[in-house]
Image: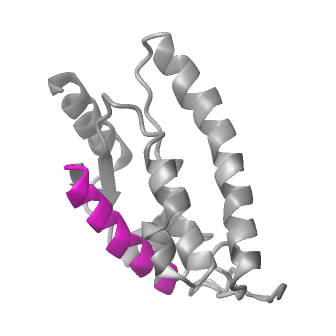
Amino acid sequence: MKLGYYKIEPNPHGIGGPGFHLKIKGKSQIIWYLIEFFSVIVLIFGKVFIPHSLNHIIIAERYVIDTIITNAYILDDPKIIKSQISRTLLRFIPKKTSIINLDADYKSILQRRKWAHNRKFIEFQKKYSKAFAKSYKAYKINTSQKNILETHNNILEYIYQN
């Protein structure tokens, strides 16, 4: 079993934070993804299914789709997005769900967060988020020219209409 290594890719502010690759393949990659799978399942039950069963409106920015995309990037393997583990994770999205895809250009993201991911990760994330948004008929909001209040109001308006 090959364990691999990781590589930090800093953003233009020089902050390394998120945006690294784990160079692992084969069984190690599957083990890593299974660990991620089970960790997100716990979050889904605690923060989505239990409140959803109590008829609460759940607004979750990430969990399933973001976990799939982030792991595909970290493991440097886009094929993970269509893997059996990913398809199983997608089944945990509640049936009556509205998906909202928030987008912004990289310049706006960096202005808002100095600790933002590097451009390579953001472009990867945007590419696959767009594909998921299309397949799940997500409501899309480009926040590049919107402030937090405008975005919040767009989300609320969409929720109340659906």
Question: Whole-percent x and y of residue 135?
Answer: 23, 57
Could you tell me which quadrant the N terminus lies in? Answer: bottom right
Q: Pick the residue in front: 132 or 157.
A: 132
What residue range appears in magenta? 120-137
Q: Is residue 142 visible in this depiction of the protein?
A: no
Judged left or right of residue 104, residue 78 is right
Q: Pick the residue in front: 108 or 19.
A: 19
**Residue in the picture at 42% in, 68% down:** 82
Q: Give above or below for 33 relative to 106.
A: above
Asked which quadrant contains residue 96, the reply is: top left
- Colouring used for the render: one colour
Question: Whole-percent x and y of residue 104?
Answer: 33, 66
Judged left or right of residue 86, residue 16 is right
Q: Give above or below for 63 relative to 30.
A: above
Q: Pick the residue in front: 28 or 14.
A: 28
Q: Is residue 41 visible in this depiction of the protein?
A: yes
